[in-house]
Amino acid sequence: MTQVIARRRALLAGGAAAVLARPAFGQARYPNRPIRIITPWPPGGSLDALQRTMFEIVGRDLGVAVLSENMPGARGTRAAIYLTQQAQPDGYTLAHHHLSILRHPFLTRQPTWDPVTDFTYIMQLSGFLFGTVVRADSSYRSLADVFAAARARPGRVSFSTSGIATTNHLAMEELCVRERCEMLHVPFRGAQEGVTALLGRQIDMVADAQSWRPQVETGEFRLLSVWTRARLPSFPDAPTLNDLGYGMSVTSPYGFVGPKGLPPEMVDTLHRSLRKALQDEASQAVIRRWEMPDEYLGPAEYLAFAQERTAYERATVARLRLSID
């Protein structure tokens, strides 16, 4: 009798273990509901065109809607703030990630985030095609003309960027230091707002990502320089910063991240789908149309880039004594 009871207990224990080992009843695969991807810039331009194209492809691939949400303001940090303060590591809230997020904690004494450990790095995507443009009826025929005017009228010649201490803002400040001139910086929430201001003659020059392209193509704007490694096939007469003797190229690579602690299997699912979307012909057509740089990195490589770049940003902020406080 004792042996029968022991045998029954063993069978019951084994059955309980098997039940515990199986997924809970009703537990669905990932993903099984819409994925939200936050972009900290206003809609419009090359970034918006590429991401929205990719999100449609990812949605079909994963079988769920991928919702694009623009959250501009706060120097492009609102998406990072949301990820670190409100989002759960469940794979349903991701964000566009850029270099200002790596730089921001060193610009302020206020508590922010650790650029490496407070995010889960999924995939680096591309970079910005920056350039400097003026109105076609401007007297400035070259970037040298702009700097000469700035030396003659310190603080009077203005340029716009998509925010204080953004990568393109710091690049312009570096150029001004080299040219020994002082210019008036006019920050906006995004590149498109700078284009609108230039059209309205509120500023002298835009130094930002390529929301200016349509106006250059129609002849409303004059492209004075591009910040890519090589000249653009569509604007072969526009010199690079290397052509002008500065020895600089600025693309400010960006990608996608999730909150801290996103499970590796979710990272793998998202990365595979995002990379598939990037390689799709529809996405490649957008890349060719806007001549966007190839900055692709997988999860491990993107994390390594963030670690290395964070050290660079910390040193740069300290060297230039930059602060937003």
Image (spheres, grey):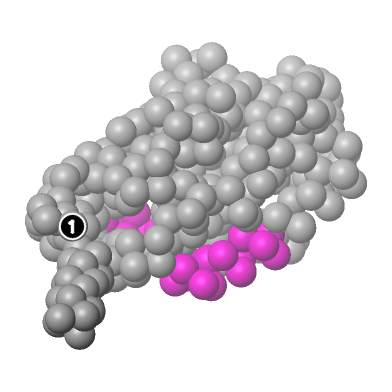
Q: Position of residue 105 (x, y in %)?
A: 71, 39
Q: In this orientation, which residue lies closer to the viewer: 296 or 212? A: 296
> Which residue shows up at 53% across the image and 72% down it?
301
Kindly indicate the quadrant of the structure image that contains residue 174.
Answer: top right
Kindly indicate the quadrant of the structure image that contains residue 235.
Answer: bottom left
Q: Which type of secondary structure does the marked residue at label 1 adopt?
A: loop
Residue assigned mark 1: 24
Residue 173 vertical placement versus 153 (above, below): below
Q: Residue furthest front?
A: 1
> Which residue shows up at 16% across the image and 45% down it?
33
Task: Answer whether residue 272 is magenta in the image.
Answer: no
Q: Amino acid at mark 1?
A: Ala
Quadrant of the snapshot with the N terminus: bottom left
- Please name the predominant secondary structure of the magenta segment in the image: helix
Kindly indicate the quadrant of the structure image that contains residue 57.
Answer: bottom left
Q: Is residue 66 visible?
A: yes
Q: Position of residue 172 (x, y in %)?
A: 70, 40
Q: How many marks?
A: 1
Q: Position of residue 268 (x, y in %)?
A: 34, 69
Q: Is residue 243 left or right of residue 176?
A: left
Q: Is residue 142 left or right of residue 180?
A: left
Quadrant of the snapshot with the C terminus: top right
Q: Position of residue 237 (x, y in %)?
A: 50, 57
Q: In this orientation, which residue lies closer to the viewer: 174 or 220? A: 174
- Range covered by the magenta-colored residues: 285-309
Q: Residue furthest bottom?
A: 3
Task: Answer whether residue 298 is magenta in the image.
Answer: yes
Q: In this orientation, which residue lies closer to the viewer: 34 or 225? A: 34
Q: Residues within 10 Å of mark 1 (few under 14, many from 20)?
A: few
Residue 75 vertical placement versus 172 (above, below): above
> Which residue shows up at 57% across the image and 20% down it?
203
Q: Is residue 285 visible?
A: no
